[in-house]
Image (cartoon, helix red, strand yellow):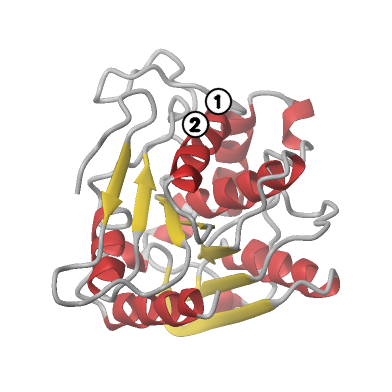
Amino acid sequence: MNEPDERVPLRWYEPAAGVGRVAGPTLLWLHGGGFFRGSLDQPEAHDVAGALARQGLAVATAGYRLAPPPGLGWVKSRAGRARGRFPLPLDDVLTAYREVSARSPEGVILGGASAGACLAAAATLRAMDEGLCPRGAVFVYGFFHPKHPRARDPRQRSRRHRRVTHAPWALDVMNRNYAGSKGSLTDRLAFPGGHELGHFPRTLVVNAEHDNMRASGDLFAAELGAARIDLEHHVLPGTRHAFLNRPALDEFATAISMIRAWSHDS
């Protein structure tokens, strides 16, 4: 594992010795954190990439710029790196994508969790605009719409403390903070949901069952299906948002196996 890019931090995870590399694309993976927090060290980045590498996949994780926390525009990141709203984090992801592509003769899969899934979807669209088409896309408990759809079925909503922290109104504030303006909220490269998806690559969507963000993830999966995209969509029973930040959970291992199997077919 190393970090060769000082401007856009990249970590590379090669398959462990004795495992053997699975032939296929490299996965460029993006952590979540509401666009304003998170790092390459959190389990959702480091443990996910390490687990996939142990199963034979080549993975790179990218440290995109974070937006300031909502209402605290003066706050800097812990690493001292300047923060920035849309489109600066997306610019970082595209920079990382170009570098990973240059080192990946079999192509790149763009993927991420939560806000990282939204960024990965937007980066997929922008890469296609630039003629740099990814081999596929992977989204785990992501959200994709500027205004979070409300889950009508109470069984699909977040539970415990996330009933408050992930209340739809709070998630909408988070989105507005990232976008920075009303105009940016409607930009397809900020929130791809509800927009024309064109020739989007084959996609894996894995959502948590009890998660206020699931309504957006399910809707985006439906939009991909309506556009006749090659889609595999799963909702993991009994799961909650951010389960990839808890590597000891069974659902962590389940999602890793799904990503590995799906990526092997790309």
Tell me whether circle 1 and circle 2 mark residues in contact (CB < 8 Å): yes
Q: 10 Å neighbourhood of mark 2: few (<14), some, or many (≥20)?
A: some
Query: Residue 70: x, y in percent?
Result: 49, 29
For image coordinates 30% across by 71% down, the residue present is 21
Instruction: Tell me which residue sits at (28%, 83%) in the image.
Output: 250
Which residue is at the front of the view, 102 or 79?
102
Q: Residues within 10 Å of mark 1 (few under 14, many from 20)?
A: some
Q: Residue furthest front?
A: 105
Q: Nearer the viewer, residue 201 or 131?
A: 131
Report the residue at 53% width, 65% height from top. 138
Q: Is residue 178 above or below residue 29?
A: above
Residue extending farthest to the bottom is: 237
| Residue 157 spot, x, y in % from top left | 55, 70
Q: SS of the residue at dot 1? A: helix
Q: Is residue 102 left or right of residue 38?
A: right
Badge number at residue 92: 2
Q: Is residue 163 left or right of residue 41?
A: right
Res 102 seen here: yes
Residue at label 1? 88
What amino acid type is highlighted by mark number 2? Asp
